[in-house]
Amino acid sequence: MPRYALQIAYVGTDFCGWQAQRGVGKHANPKPSIEETVAQAIEKQSGAADLNLVSSGRTDAGVHASGHVAHFDLENAPVPIENFHRGINRHLPKSIRIQKLVIAPDSFRAQKATRKQYSYYFQQGPTNLPHLRPVTMWNRYPLNCGKMDAAILHLLGTHDFAAFGSSGAKLASTTRTLFEAEVTREPIPLPGSIAEGDAHLLRLRIVGSGFLKQMMRSIAGTLKQIGEGRREPEEMREILASKDRQLVGPTAPASGLWLDRVWYEEEVFE
């Protein structure tokens, strides 16, 4: 039975996250999940039923992706694969696209990632630009990129990130390794009457062995306070060592968070 690996891009604004949120009454989420939307598109194109779509991980409601990875097995595989790929995309909403679809080795497991890259985007400028509002966090006041970049370096290496994880999560271990971390600043080119240089994007980029639930958004919220001058960069190290969730800044909105890339020991998309 062939195994297919797919790389997925999506804007998560209109979805409840990767995984369907079960529940009734006030706990029900009326928004569809990325998982069920993609699985239904594959089923429509292939004629399969009850497809088992295995993901590299979950994203929360409102989080976006340009490199989410999943796999599925299909007994009666449509050919050629290029037509299968295009057909799946025809059944998807415009906010979701399969970027790559390949036949992977039977040993490939989407959930066995060796590292992941997330980015968080802060939008800076006199107003919240409408076309960027769904995919960034707007900050009216200037953020000190240098201080934010200095602060994030305190998190590099292997540490217990309990302070930055969701308080309700129960895990065997909260230890993770961060391989790369930086905050960079780029101008947003704008036409018309808005002067060039008035708007910028600050990008928080982190590559890690794995991430706790809401870990990126907690780090982003704390960095925002540092960028505003309300905290010093050295406090990031103190928060990490404390393992105390109460010392972390407000959780940043999901709108600014992107899953960029997922790596494996055996790369199937190269």
Image (spheres, rainbow, N blue to C red):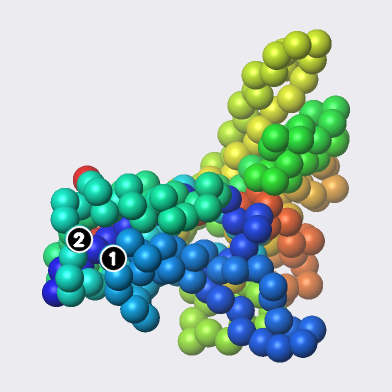
- Report the Cα–Cα distance between label 2 and label 1: 6 Å
Q: Quadrant of residue 219?
A: bottom right
The amino acid type of the residue labelled 1 equals Ser
Circles 2 and 1, Cβ within 8 Å, touching? The answer is yes
- Indicate left or right for 11 with 133 as reference: left
Which structural element holds mark 2?
loop
Name above or below for residue 170 compared with residue 35. below
Expressed as whole percent of the image width and height from the top left, the position of residue 198 reads: 77, 20
Which structural element holds mark 1?
helix
Q: Residues within 10 Å of mark 1 (few under 14, many from 20)?
A: some
Expressed as whole percent of the image width and height from the top left, the position of residue 39 reads: 41, 69
Expressed as whole percent of the image width and height from the top left, the position of residue 183 reads: 59, 39
Expressed as whole percent of the image width and height from the top left, the position of residue 252 reads: 73, 56
Name above or below for residue 239 compared with residue 147. below
Q: Quadrant of the N terminus?
A: bottom left
Residue receiving disc 1 = 46
Which residue is more in the foreground, 143 or 43?
Answer: 43
Kindly identify the residue that appears in the image at 61 percent across and 48 percent down: 120
Q: Earlier in the sequence, mark 2 or mark 1?
A: 1
Instruction: Give the label on residue 78, or none.
Output: 2
Q: Is residue 95 visible?
A: yes
Kindly identify the residue that appears in the image at 78 percent across and 72 percent down: 246
- Indicate left or right for 1 with 18 as reference: left
The amino acid type of the residue labelled 2 equals Pro
- Indicate left or right for 270 with 25 as reference: left
Kindly identify the residue that appears in the image at 49 percent across and 81 percent down: 173
Q: Is residue 236 visible?
A: no
Q: Quadrant of the C terminus?
A: top left
